[in-house]
Amino acid sequence: MDRYEYIGHLHIHSNFSDGSGSIQEIARAGREAGLDFIGVTDHNTLAGREEGFEGRQNDILVLIGIEFGKEKNHYIAFGVDKLPGDTRDPQKVIDSVNAQGGFGYLAHPGEKSNPAFLGGKAYPWDRWDVKNFKGLEIWNFSSIWREAYHKKTVAVFWFFADRYRGGRFPEPETLKKWDILAARRPVTAFGGSDAHAFPVHLGPLKLSVFAYNFLFRTVNTHLLLKEKLSRQSSRAREQVLKALREGSFFIGSDYYAPTRGFRFSAVNRDEEADMGGEIRRLPDTVLRIISPSKQGVVRIICNGKLVCESRRKIVVFKVLQEGVFRVEVYWRPRLGKPIPWIYSNPIYVKEQKPEAGRQETE
Ligand SMILES: [Zn+2]
Ligand SMILES: [Zn+2]
């Protein structure tokens, strides 16, 4: 059964914290970029929600989440109504979010400092003893971009020559960490741009460094729903939160080419699993992948290891072992190396357990 696909951008800062745009301006930029929803996650405040900015604004759904944390250990959460009493201990923040029925992600966990930006400050995650978070931000466009160039002059050159280039891949160490964690329990991939649209004055010119409408073509969240997104705000909010909670989405960077149309599911004679789901390994269990373009290279990763690479648009892969399966698709430019393009959430394939009272007839 096909799914309805909705494209959104998560991890955005408005002028309720240190972003430059109002939520109305950000929503307008989102509509111009063709997005169906946005997730505004201001630092340590839910003011956007309290002041009534959550909900449908014409054709775009605005969700208000939050980014907790000051120095290290930033935590992005959705589905929360109040701030935890103690935000210094990341585990207490995670527990408070979960107790409210919300969920969250470790933000830019592998961020590295670069003397050329933010005075050499970085905001990585260093409390790997925490439990019960939903996932990891595997790709944070701004964070990766700031790591790319160690000289300001080089950064300025690339900003004008190809401003996407510096942020064109997820953090490799975070991907490894994700595979290790997901082997133990379901862990969802999260991505975004960390949009702030900082204003910069260049002589008489006032430029927006990485304007919202530019960033909304980068690391996007593509949700796959079983039913259409409701026109009603509260129902649509629930639908988006449910899909995020279940991991029924992929991260697609729509900058070079649209990633709309990517699909990844697993099927056997008894059941079908979407991204984020679980399926038993039967003799006929296969993964089905649709790449949105012939210019893609599909890579299937099982337990952190590459098990298949294909340039086909449709890939059917017979599953011979249990494990955590996820898919990456790279975009092949005319010249140069394939560029990271799509990161699916995993499907968890479990070995069939013998069931009491059931006879196999094969
Ligand atoms: Zn942050
Ligand atoms: Zn942020």
Image (tube, grey):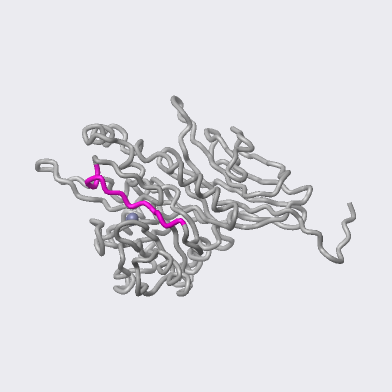
Residue range highlighted in magenta: 117-128
Measuring from the top left, give residue 265's x and y in whole percent.
63, 50
Say which of 154 and 196 sits in front: 154
The percent coordinates of residue 272 (x first, y second) are 69, 56
Residue 122 part of the magenta segment: yes
Asked if the stretch drawn in magenta spans residue 303, the answer is no
In this view of the protein, which residue sits in the foreground, 128 or 270?
128
In this figure, what is the number of numbered marks?
A: 0
Residue 146: where, in percent of width, then height? 30, 42
Where, by quadrant of the figure, is residue 316 drawn? top right
Image quadrant in which you'd find residue 49 = bottom left
- Give the residue drawn at x 55%, y 46%: 262
Question: Residue, x 58% and y 47% (percent of image)?
Answer: 326
Residue that appears at 64% across and 53% down: 348
Is residue 64 among the parts visible in the rendering? no
Residue 45 in sight in this render: yes
In this view, 305 is above or below 131: above
Considering the image in quadrants, where does the N terminus appear?
bottom right
Q: Position of residue 186 (x, y in %)?
A: 57, 57
